[in-house]
Image (cartoon, rainbow, N blue to C red):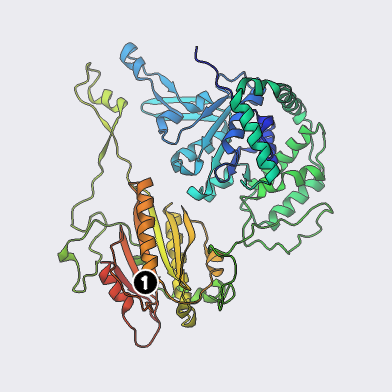
Amino acid sequence: MAPTIAKFPFTAVAGQSDFKLALLLATVNPNIGGVLVSGPRGSAKSTLAKGLADILPNSTLNSTEAQHPFVTLPLGASEDMLLGTLNLQKVLDDKTVAFQPGLLAKAHGGVLYVDEVNLLSDNLVDYLLDVAASGLNIVERDGISHSHASEFILLGTMNPDEGELRPQLQDRFGLSVELSNQYSLDERINIVRLREAFDYDSHAFCASYSDKQEALRQTILAAREILAQVKCPDHCRRSIAERCHAAQVDGLRADIVWTQAAIANAALAQRELVNEQDLLAVEELVLSHRRKQNANNNSQPPSPPPFSRPPQAPSQQHPTQNNQPQKDAPAQGDWGAMDALEQQSQEITNEALALSIAAKTTPLNNSQRNNSGVKTLGFVKGKSAAGSQSLKRNSQKVSWFNSLIVNLGEWPLRKLAFKPEKSGAATLNLILLDTSGSVLANHSFAKAKGLIMQIAQQAYLKREQISIIGFGNQNVDTLLGRRRAPKTIRAFLDNITAAGGTPLQEALNKARDFQYQQLRKSPELSFNTYIVTDGRVRQTGQTEMLTGQVTVIDIEQAPVKRGIAKDLAAALQAHYLPLTG
């Protein structure tokens, strides 16, 4: 028998009280819908998540004892591994169709843990959340019709620096916690001491916390026993509704989760009536990932109860690296609020927009370039630029069910059938945004901002990623790191400032280096790059090619254009898009 690997005790983790509370609430009342934890590296996300298994009572989720109290879903998991599939060995040995359980079956009665859930494929996350909500896994595939109970606590962790979770999926997690890895000096010293003691003798260290672990386990059991008796009075329900309305949340999921979480919090305190303390204790856990950023924090809902407090929207930090106002830089918002520029944004023609958000095309040969060397769109629906019909290809994964059908029961198999290859590698929309003073002076950003919003909206609908690099005031800054395209980018754009010169060459160098770094991490990644500039730059230099499809968007509004943006497009062999009028 393999030796047991000791895990750092849940009760030994210093700090992170919000995370601990969220885990305990989800353990007491699984109807809350799981916990999403967001935070940078070194904030004890994985340590606390894995430590949860040791404090779970034997009868997790009011079911029989779980054989696998803590199941980890790896990032490379397939649908078969998650949902279950055909038991090929049974087919070959007994010639009977049998179900091979997946991770959802193993996690029944325990915890299903997904580290870096934001990097998990969307279809797997969809399956996870659907089963977590229904408690039932229904499999209709590969000739199998099977269903089984699958009740578990869904626990996902993520590092926002590596990409965000789609808002639709983020909302379906019951509770959300945003962690910080900023600690005081005393906290840092204490954490290091605890870790040293654990590494020196992990079994002795865990034994020293056994009493605290057992006490917490009994607290969870006691909370579950009275959970059904806990009531939420009407005045508390009204306060929840008012606060959710003030936060402008979508739908009623926040109201339901807040009520369930408050009931669980009261049960942990062995009280049978929810009070003000319970509502406040879980407020941010419920609203932090659902609250709209443009919610009016100063507006008060009608007749709020005396204990309620208006929700605090996440602070919007300046998107540049330097938070101090630069010399001669205009104040935030000088680029114009979107409401005032909505009509100008609509003036962007359908043809220009189609060019700016064009899908990936195959490389064009010299005959498909115009006289200026600029690429032209040479594709039609269903065909590539070269005119060849796009066909679906098969992957290297064997479809065993289809193989058995093809061979009509013969053994050994004469030929194999393969699953279709999944199309659509990840796409990153990289925007180089001119934030120089000349853009502001000429009022050019109104149209550029509308176009950027359209690019971001299309990327959001296509589940693509986005990143924005700003260049102005002799600086090149990453305004928005690589992430999934947000549902709205309006408030973000309104807070960008403009000033100074135009370091275009430095921006191109940074973009090339950024592409190289991203391709090392994700070799299959494809790029759509948009360079938004008025071309008012005195710098000259050798221009190196960028990866993927490149579009230069010329926002120069002068009566007589200098033509630098057009020359740049020719040098980069990019599409050229002038925004006029």
Type of amino acid under label 1: Ile
In the image, taking residue 481 as reference, residue 186 lies left or right, namely: right
Q: Is residue 18 visible?
A: no
In the image, taking residue 547 as reference, residue 114 lies left or right, namely: right
Name the quadrant containing residue 214.
top right
Label 1 CA crowd tier, 10 Å (few <14, some 14–19, many 20+): many
- The image shows residue 389 at horizontal and vertical percentages of 20, 51
The mark tally for this picture is 1
State the quadrant of the C terminus: bottom left
- The image shows residue 531 at horizontal and vertical percentages of 37, 68
- The image shows residue 362 at horizontal and vertical percentages of 24, 56
Front-lying residue, 121 or 572: 572
Front-lying residue, 325 or 278: 325
Q: Secondary structure at mark 1?
A: strand
Q: Is residue 536 visible?
A: yes
Front-lying residue, 103 or 383: 103
Residue at 57% x, 41% y: name it: 42
As drawn, which residue projects farthest toward the right?
Answer: 306
Q: Which residue is mark 1?
A: 553
